[in-house]
Image: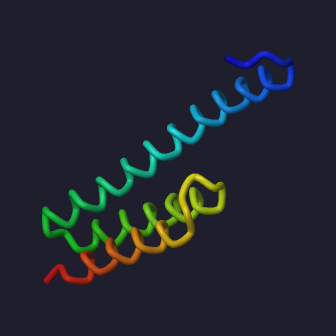
């Protein structure tokens, strides 16, 4: 457990930041799930719209440090590839 005042404050800050990052990660997963559901239904226009929204959220999380840049790019790329594959 933290003993010094600065360590106690750091622990509080980490707890707040973790909660914020969990919420952002959860929101991103929801948007990704919407894209995947549109892909499985076969609706290309809905999938494209959902991808546009998901891409925005993913790259926002990259800029905020929730995801590594390459991870965000990989997720967007794979989703885009699957949307384009819809006949």
Residue closer to the observer: 8 or 12? 8
Q: Quadrant of the C terminus?
A: bottom left
Image point (39%, 68%), residue name: 75
Most extreme residue toward the right, as rendered?
5
Residue 17 percent across, percent down from the top left: 65, 36
Image point (49%, 67%), residue name: 72
Query: Based on the displayed image, in which of its 4 quarters is residue 86 positioned?
Result: bottom left
Image point (22%, 62%), residue name: 38
In the image, residue 86 above or below residue 36: below
Q: How is the image coloured?
A: rainbow
Image point (48%, 74%), residue name: 73
Residue 58 percent across, percent down from the top left: 50, 61
Q: How many marks?
A: 0
Q: Quadrant of the N terminus?
A: top right
In the image, residue 85 above or below residue 5: below
Query: Based on the displayed image, in which of its 4 quarters is residue 32 positioned?
Result: bottom left
Residue 62 percent across, percent down from the top left: 58, 62
Residue closer to the observer: 39 or 60? 60
Residue 66 percent across, percent down from the top left: 57, 52
Left or right? Give the position of 33 relative to 27. left
Residue closer to the observer: 19 or 12? 12
In the image, residue 21 above or below residue 61: above
């Amino acid at each position: 457990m933290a003993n010094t005042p600065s360590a106690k404050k750091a622990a509080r800050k980490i707890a707040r930041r973790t909660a914020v990052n969990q919420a952002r990660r959860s929101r991103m997963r929801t948007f990704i799930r919407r894209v995947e559901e549109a892909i499985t239904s076969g609706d290309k226009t809905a999938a494209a719209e959902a991808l546009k929204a998901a891409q925005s959220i993913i790259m926002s999380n990259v800029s905020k440090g929730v995801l590594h840049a390459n991870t965000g790019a990989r997720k967007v790329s794979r989703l885009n590839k699957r949307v384009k594959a819809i006949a």
